[in-house]
Image: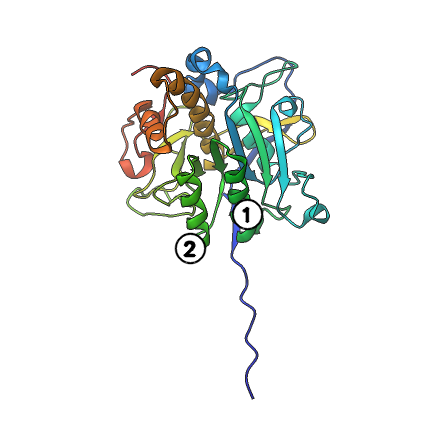
Amino acid sequence: MKKNLKEVKELEVRLIPYTMNRDNLRVKNKISPYGVNMIAAQNMWKSSYKGQGVKVAIIDSGCDVNHVSLRDNIAGVRNFTTEDMKNPNIVTDRVGHGTHVAGIIAADGKNNSIVGVAPEAELYILKAIDQTGSGKLSWVVNAINYAVNLDVDIISMSLGMGVSDDKLERAVNNAVKNGISIVCAAGNEGDGNYDDFEYSYPASYVDVISVGAVDKKSVPASFSNSNLVIDCVAPGVDIISTYPGNTYASLSGTSMAAPHVTGSLALLKNWSDDEFQRELTPEELYAQLIKFTKTLDYPRTIQGNGIVYLKSR
């Protein structure tokens, strides 16, 4: 008698672990969170039109699309999870993570609220993570492929898994071949030993911009992964941003660092289109990003090329 073959369980992708510092915060006056100031985003707002027209896909846990600081910048939504009866037009964020990421990238500062790095970028909310903080690998792959069909400029992902997968790598490579820059959180499994490497995927793929976290003093966060493929770092400790229910929250993690770089790329894209009188490839845009970094006094394994800093070199 033949034995029944066990069904192979599909791989899961999880949100990069993060820390909730403070929630249910209220903002009464328009503010620029310290991360936006620290990377000198305002320095490039005029020459980059604040990211106007740049299409950014956020593959995450969804978003509070009615949030006062985000609703005018939401250009499209798609649900790839089984939540909400698989309704493709409902991207309810039951975790809060995706809403927070969206605000770091493009909160518009209206109604006396916070402002993101690229406050006029167009956001496409692609929900591939459910209320458990995880999602099937196929949901993420489908979201990446959907972003390619949308012809977005940048994909931002603050999620990952500890092993590589051929389907995920092919989806990432295909997106880059189609002219899309991909930014990912490096991961929060760091142990403070910069010679002890931790890898997360898709952040560790060669064509992905892998982002580690530093605090407001530019000190690498103790949780930030170190490895041989870190590209740069950005603020990721005690970051205030949008949160479901028209509120705000402070979170820490490389999940918060990556969207600072996503927003920076949106600004650099518009700036470079004017500067070079043509649209740069993802590789060329990456080269411009690296020109706008400052080397820190730490090993390359924790900082890559350094912290993003959008002032002329």
Query: Is residue 250 at least partly visible in the picture?
Result: no
Task: Give the number of the disc on residue 20.
Answer: none
Q: Is residue 220 above or below residue 172?
A: above
Please give the name of the residue rendered at 48% of the width and 36% of the height, measured from the top-left corner: 155
**Residue 208 x/y as whole percent:** 39, 40
In the rendered structure, the answer to whether residue 122 lies left or right of residue 42 reads right
Please give the name of the residue rendered at 63% of the width and 15% of the height, measured from the top-left corner: 110
Quadrant in the picture for residue 268: top left
Quadrant in the picture for residue 181: top left
Give the Cα separation between the discs numbered 2 and 1: 14 Å
Front-most of residues 58 and 211:
58
Please give the name of the residue rendered at 52% of the width and 16% of the height, measured from the top-left corner: 32
Query: Which amino acid type corresponds to the residue marked 2 in the rendered image?
Result: Asp
Please give the name of the residue rendered at 55% of the width and 42% of the height, measured from the top-left corner: 146
Front-most of residues 162 and 19:
162
In the rendered structure, the answer to whether residue 153 lies left or right of residue 196 reads right
Q: Is residue 281 above or below residue 59?
A: above
In the rendered structure, the answer to whether residue 79 lies left or right of residue 101 reads right
Q: Is residue 288 above or below residue 96?
A: above
Q: Earlier in the sequence, mark 2 or mark 1?
A: 1
**Farthest residue in the right direction?**
85
Q: Which element carries disc 1, helix, strand or loop?
A: helix
Query: Which amino acid type corresponds to the residue marked 1 in the rendered image?
Result: Asn
**Residue 12 x/y as whole percent:** 53, 54
The quadrant of the rendering that contains the C terminus is: top left
Quadrant in the picture for residue 214: top left
Other residues around mark 2 within 10 Å, as few (<14) / some (14–19) / many (≥20): few
The residue indicated by pointer 2 is 166
Front-most of residues 10 and 275:
275
The quadrant of the rendering that contains the N terminus is: bottom right
The residue indicated by pointer 1 is 142
